[in-house]
Amino acid sequence: MNRGLKIISEIAGVGVILLIMWATVQSFSSQSPMPVGIDMDIESIVTQVNQYCAGGQINSKGTCNSLLQKLQGAIEARDRGQPEVACNKLNAFSNEVQAQSGKKIDPAAAQVLVDMVTPLCAPVPTATATEIVVSPLPTPTPNKQQLLTVFLTLSDEETKRDELYKVILDYQGQLITNAQKIEFPLEPLFRVKNLHVSPNGQNIILEWIHPNSMSYLTTLNPNTLESVQLLTHKTDDEAGASFIAWHPNNRDIFVEGYSTPFSADRIWVINVNTHDYNDKINIRKDLARSNVTNIAFSPDGQTVVYGWKECGSCYTSQIWRINLDNTQEQLLFKDKTQAFQVNDLTWSTDGNTISFAHSHGVPQDGTIGDLYLMPANGGQVKKLSSVVVDIYSRFKPQWLSNSQAFFFVKEDEQKYRNLYKVKVNSGQVQQVTHFASNNLFRLTWLNQATQLGFFVEMNGQYYLTLIEPTGQIIKQLPLDPIIQKIKAEQLSALTHSQINLRSLLILPY
């Protein structure tokens, strides 16, 4: 589009600038097919299909596989520069969705998928140029896709107190609204241990530590900031528990309980909506929960894999797989070196592959380990690279929606931590970022898996960084001005505050 720009006048001291702009205006004289280029977003549809398959809106495994194969074919055609072939694949996808609507696909879910596909290959009008005058130039209003929600904790190491805040940022790092301090009515917040967001981003479990050194769980609505403490009982007002994992259904969480009415030899399931709980998962009757090092759910939510060690102080590691109905328990991997612990178990989005880290000893704050891949049903284990792990899952790898690659954090010889990408089939490892940073953490997919967000600490300053799945950096937003603004507005009662690394969380707005 050809544009000319001329400054007419500037009002001194006020900074008001009037502009004359020559712009191109579309004239709907004809229509042509939309070009399918590298920016065509098919990956977000893959993510949506995987979510529907896991949530039961698509109730046939065969239909799930068929739809995902068509989308993968469209992605490959797009990447080869064959837009017509890609559109043919997408049209076949749309036809199958409509044919199965009300049968194997929930009608509402089918409509969402059709609506996502339709614009990608729709005809668009051609354009002719017309000269217009625009004065003044309007200021664009950010839409929801251009905003980010960040939860951050300020910690005072002298008083051992934490404060949790919610801020909404635009893609320039500017606050859209004033920071909101989150208050908790049932129990004064002492120390934030971690924040655990549900798969759909609609709920947060706040894991916090009381002065009695026990961990407690509180649900937090990221939109309304309403909070409810879990596990409060008439006979036991302080039932403590540690968070393990969210179920893909976005409703249940799995916890380790260690006070009445819980016992430590069970993994308990809590419905965050009703607060009902049970011990329907019975992982090996001879197993103490303290020996389980990590748990991960399959994308369909029907199976878990977990890391296990023989005793609390032992490092002999195993990986087991079990269905939620406690059937078909299977030993997938056993380490014979007696020098490692399994952590950061993750499933690929298609459910076919498992990645895990072997930390060298008990993981602490940024322990170095090794990264491995293995088939989800067991088989050959492939070592890929060194990797950073810790007990707070701040460095957990993140899979691409097509399951062909994933991102992870690695530390080099200079102790700098950067983002790397590994291709599953070839095992090829590619360095994505080149920061002189001693901390890069909290990898999070945003905007329907079209952007990867994470935090970077450099020279004592914190930045929120966004990249594309290709690895290209989109934005890097400083967080320290936001912290200074919180202090300037006297929202914080802390006098020696700094960011709590474990409790930074990014969500799309």
Image (cartoon, rainbow, N blue to C red):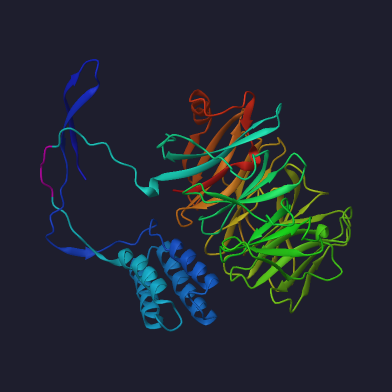
Report the front residue among 10 and 416. 10
Q: Quadrant of residue 212?
A: top right
Q: Is residue 131 magenta?
A: yes
Left/right of residue 207 with respect to residue 132 in the rendered view = right
Q: Residue at x 49, y 80 (%)?
A: 63
Report the front residue among 174 and 333. 174
Report the front residue among 341 and 110. 110
Q: Residue at x 51, y 68 (%)?
A: 50
Which secondary structure type mostly characterizes the magenta part of the structure?
loop
Q: Is residue 435 visible?
A: no
Instruction: Work out whether 143 lies above or below 78.
Output: above
Left/right of residue 370 with respect to residue 121 in the rendered view = right
Residue range in magenta is 129-133
| Number of marks | 0
Q: Is residue 241 magenta?
A: no
Q: Position of residue 475 (x, y in %)?
A: 46, 40
Q: Quadrant of residue 161?
A: top right
Left/right of residue 245 with respect to residue 360 in the rendered view = left
Q: Which quadrant of the rendered structure holds the N terminus?
A: top left
Q: Residue at x 44, y 78 (%)?
A: 105
